[in-house]
Amino acid sequence: MAIKKILVIEDDRFIGEMYVRSLKHENYEVDWVVDGHDGLVAATGKPYDLILLDIMLPEMRGPEILAALRGKGVDKIPNTRIAVMTNFDQDVESRVALQHDVDAYLIKAEITPRRLIEIIHELDAMPPKTA
């Protein structure tokens, strides 16, 4: 299953615009929302191949969205990959807990648009995680 449709859940306007522009330039279909509640609604309302999920969001945090999508052993989006993107330095226990339910854990400061595309290509070669 090739990654074609991507949902970006990112509240930082500069970063969101950069991701959207870069992804569209590579011919991905991209939707972008800026708060957690809208992100959860979008993620469950339309099929996506990949969700780029920020951790620190207004309305609902990334871990809450992740729990709603893949928590308690139920995967509501089984054919969707999730890449968590953050600049928030988490303790090891929190990071490991998040990594269990995501396909990639990325530090935004280390991700250029070119590197983001490379990571998406790497994810494209892997099957999605399941709960």
Image: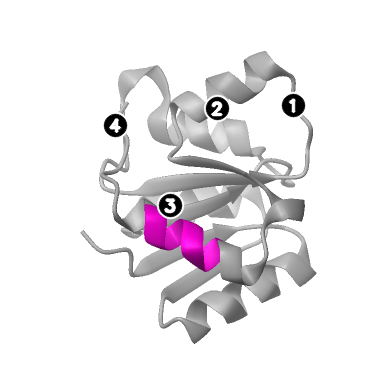
Q: For numbered disc 4, what is the local secondary structure?
A: loop
Sequence-wise, the earlier of marks 3 and 1 is: 3
From the viewer's perspective, is 71 left or right of 98?
Answer: left
Q: Nearer the viewer, residue 53 or 76?
A: 53
Q: Amino acid at mark 2?
A: Leu
Residue 26 location (% of width, % of height): 45, 81
Q: For numbered disc 1, what is the local secondary structure?
A: loop
Q: For numbered disc 2, what is the local secondary structure?
A: helix
Is residue 45 in sight in this rendering?
Answer: no
Nearer the camera: disc 4 or disc 3: 4
Q: Disc 2 vs disc 1: Cβ atoms closer than 8 Å? A: yes
As measured in the structure, the alpha-carbon distance from the residue carrying label 3 to the one carrying label 1 is: 24 Å
**Mainly helix, strand or loop, the magenta region?**
helix
As measured in the structure, the alpha-carbon distance from the residue carrying label 1 to the one carrying label 4 is: 23 Å
Residue under label 2, please give it. Answer: 98
Sequence-wise, the earlier of marks 3 and 2 is: 3
Q: Quadrant of the N terminus?
A: bottom left
Residue under label 3, please give it. Answer: 43
Residue under label 1, please give it. Answer: 90
Q: Disc 3 vs disc 1: Cβ atoms closer than 8 Å? A: no
Residue under label 4, please give it. Answer: 130
110 lies above or below 96:
below
What's the magenta region?
Answer: 116-122
Residue 33 location (% of width, % of height): 60, 63
Q: Amino acid at mark 3?
A: Ala
Sequence-wise, the earlier of marks 2 and 4 is: 2
128 lies above or below 118:
above
As measured in the structure, the alpha-carbon distance from the residue carrying label 2 to the one carrying label 1 is: 10 Å
As measured in the structure, the alpha-carbon distance from the residue carrying label 2 to the one carrying label 4 is: 13 Å
